[in-house]
């Protein structure tokens, strides 16, 4: 081996060690931040979750800083060494492949780091997904607390709040028939803002089934296309017939998916709107018009 090869090895070992430390730091930071973000999201009473988004932005900034360190070091310590030796060693040299191998190994290791970064970035992004069942339960609990505590302004008789109202509403006193104005709380009003999201969370498994089926169409198309390309220079008739038979089979599967995916979407859509209507029955008429409009597309 040439004398300079030891420098390449040392650079590679330092690079691998550096990334391991960065990955450990990134994992430690993310695993501590994720439960904190989830807790802030659930306990933040602000409708716009401003405290959460401020902390969320800071966490992403820290994660991006770690990533930038890896990129800056890669350009300075790895590409710098690579370009230096690549310019000095002839491509005809039997040792030139050592320089290329160095870059490839370091590049592959950097890609592994990027994959880990993407993983933790996605995990942090998921903390934005509010558990709407918890928020819905808070609204139900509040309703149970107040439904028998509203009284007539005229005669003082108790007026039962029969359902969760989304807007300010006039309610007649059953004793003196006086019209009383009932104003729902901010939390109660918020039900109409979370209703669709909650319905979507409850039917997410049906949407995933549709997405999985829908994605199969492209996969089957590419498989068939690759087989088709492989037949261009195929001279063996037996192999050619086998490939054509497989292509026909793939096309049949693709056509089935093309027909089936929209059906699965309709199953999801109907189930989602049914859940939505259960959560906010007052909006059912409006929701059903939206549902019919969506079926047209």
Image (cartoon, helix red, strand yellow):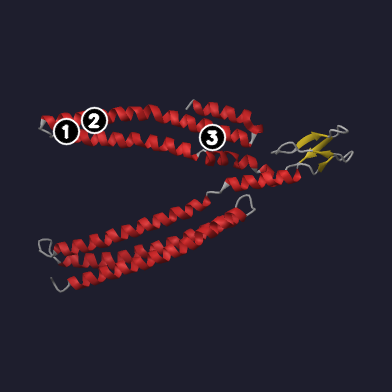
Q: Quadrant of the N terminus?
A: bottom left
Q: Of tags 1 and 3, which is closer to the observer?
A: 3
x then y, percent, for residue 40: 58, 57
Q: Looking at the image, do the residues carrying marks 1 and 3 touch, with CB atoms under 8 Å apart? A: no
Q: What residue is at 31 percent from the left and 64 percent from the top?
A: 74
Q: Looking at the image, do the residues carrying marks 1 and 2 touch, with CB atoms under 8 Å apart? A: yes
SS label for mark 1: loop
Badge 1, how many Cα within 10 Å: few under 14, some, many 20+? Answer: some
SS label for mark 2: helix
Work out how far the residue at label 1 is from the one at label 3, CA to CA, in angstroms.
46 Å
Q: What residue is at 49 percent from the left and 40 percent from the top?
A: 204
Q: How many marks?
A: 3
Give the answer, above or below, for where 115 lies relative to 170: below
x then y, percent, for residue 44: 62, 55
Work out how far the residue at label 1 is from the one at label 2, CA to CA, in angstroms.
10 Å
Q: Of tags 1 and 2, which is closer to the observer?
A: 2
Q: Earlier in the sequence, mark 1 or mark 3?
A: 1
Q: What residue is at 31 percent from the left and 37 percent from the top?
A: 219
* Residue 272: numbered disc: 3
Q: Looking at the image, do the residues carrying marks 2 and 3 touch, with CB atoms under 8 Å apart? A: no
Left-right relation of 157 to 21: right
Pick the residue in front: 240 or 83: 240
């Amino acid at each position: 081996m040439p004398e300079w090869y030891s420098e390449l090895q040392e650079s590679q070992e330092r690079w691998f060690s550096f990334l391991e430390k960065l990955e450990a730091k990134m994992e430690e930071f993310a695993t501590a931040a994720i439960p904190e973000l989830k807790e802030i999201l659930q306990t933040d009473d602000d409708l716009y979750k401003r405290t959460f988004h401020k902390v969320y932005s800071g966490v992403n900034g820290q994660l991006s800083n770690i990533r930038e360190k890896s990129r800056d070091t890669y350009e300075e310590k790895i590409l710098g060494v690579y370009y230096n030796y690549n310019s000095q060693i002839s491509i005809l040299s039997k040792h030139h492949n050592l320089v290329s191998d160095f870059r490839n190994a370091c590049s592959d290791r950097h890609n592994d780091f990027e994959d880990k970064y993407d993983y933790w970035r996605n995990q942090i992004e998921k903390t934005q997904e509010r558990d709407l069942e918890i928020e819905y339960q808070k609204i139900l609990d509040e309703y149970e607390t107040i439904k028998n505590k509203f009284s007539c302004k005229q005669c003082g008789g108790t007026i039962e709040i029969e359902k969760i109202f989304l807007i300010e509403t006039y309610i007649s006193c059953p004793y003196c028939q006086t019209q009383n104005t009932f104003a729902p709380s901010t939390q109660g009003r918020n039900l109409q803002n979370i209703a669709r999201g909650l319905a979507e969370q409850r039917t997410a498994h049906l949407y995933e089934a549709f997405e999985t089926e829908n994605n199969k169409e492209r996969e089957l198309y590419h498989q068939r296309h690759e087989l088709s390309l492989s037949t261009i220079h195929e001279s063996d008739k037996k192999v050619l017939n086998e490939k054509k038979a497989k292509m026909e089979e793939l096309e049949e599967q693709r056509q089935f998916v093309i027909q089936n995916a929209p059906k699965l979407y309709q199953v999801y859509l109907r189930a989602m709107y049914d859940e939505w209507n259960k959560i906010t029955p007052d909006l059912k008429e409006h929701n059903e018009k939206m549902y019919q409009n969506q079926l047209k597309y």
